[in-house]
Image (tube, helix red, strand yellow):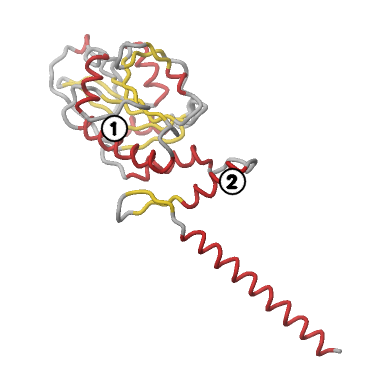
Amino acid sequence: MILLGILYYGIPAAQAAPTVSATAEEALKRSRAAEGNEVTSHVLTDQDGHPVDIASYRGKPLVVSMIYTACDHTCPVTTQNVAKAVAGARKTLGTDSFQVLSIGFDTVRDTPANLKSYARSQGIDLKGWSFLAGDPATMEALAAELGFTWYVTSRGFDHIAQTTVIDGRGHIYRQVYGENFELPLLVEPLKDLVLGRTAALTSLQSIGDRLRFFCTVYDPHSDAYRFDYGIFLDLGFGLLAVMTIFWLVVRLWRESRAAQR
């Protein structure tokens, strides 16, 4: 469940990002304990140099991936896997149904310019996906709320490979682990939040969303989500079977009453 990314670039620890010492087990425990946390106001800088308050993303689900741009393996692989899941989720749930952030935790090298270059190198379309940088104090406070652990080693950074799903109210809904996680691990919690697994059926839209929720299924053969019309057929056949049984019971009851007369 825990993957550690290490980079060898020899930055002195005093100049690097804030340090958090933890074993892999402690990192996982801390991450899981963060579910339900509120992600509060933190002002960062996007890839174009504009200040952005992470609290401004409320109203829609938010996917947060913590990376560092100088990473040559784990972070690029994670970013590509997140991009694949995001593309699948947007195709299913709508292009504007949620937002995505990649946040650079290396406060020395993850400048807006380097983040923009990283996004370009990963082929990321920046519509609805921002890359953010922050100062050490902000990054440490944000990491604490996200349950994200990283620390400096003599060779660079170790960190938990974690993608966080945040609901529209700013609370952590789900943590997804690993650089090569399976598509449903990220899409299913987004389905919950966008289509409303537990939302009240108070309007035609909410009823439609609930139908979409149950009829949008993952196909492992194509590694993609699709709308399964067969569910309607199953429901129709089920309803027909119930009505047939009810009709037979009523008919038998009437025949029995007639015979008694």
Q: Residue at x 45, y 34 (%)?
A: 97
Left or right placement of residue 45 versus residue 194 in this view? left
Rendered position, 198 above or below 4 = below
Q: Which of the 4 image quarters holds residue 255?
A: bottom right
**Rendered location of residue 200, percent (x, y):** 62, 41
Could you tell me which quadrant the N terminus lies in?
top left
Rendered position, 172 above or below 237 = above
Left or right placement of residue 130 versus residue 156 in this view? right
Q: So how many labels did they put on this image?
A: 2
**Element on which disc 1 rests:** loop
The residue pinned by badge 1 equals 161
Closest to the observer, 165 or 202: 202
Q: CA distance from mark 2 to mark 1?
A: 36 Å
Q: Are marks 2 and 1 in contact (CB under 8 Å)?
A: no
**Rendered location of residue 204, percent (x, y):** 61, 43
**Rendered location of residue 32, percent (x, y):** 41, 34
Q: Residue at x 33, y 16 (%)?
A: 46
Rendered position, 204 above or below 126 = below
- The circle on residue 252 is none
Q: Residue at x 13, y 22 (%)?
A: 8
Q: Amino acid at mark 2?
A: Ile
Q: Amino acid at mark 1?
A: Ala
Q: Earlier in the sequence, mark 2 or mark 1?
A: 1
Could you tell me which quadrant the C terminus lies in?
bottom right
The residue pinned by badge 2 equals 207
Q: Residue at x 40, y 29 (%)?
A: 99
Left or right placement of residue 37 versus residue 106 in this view? right
Q: Which of the 4 image quarters holds residue 5?
A: top left
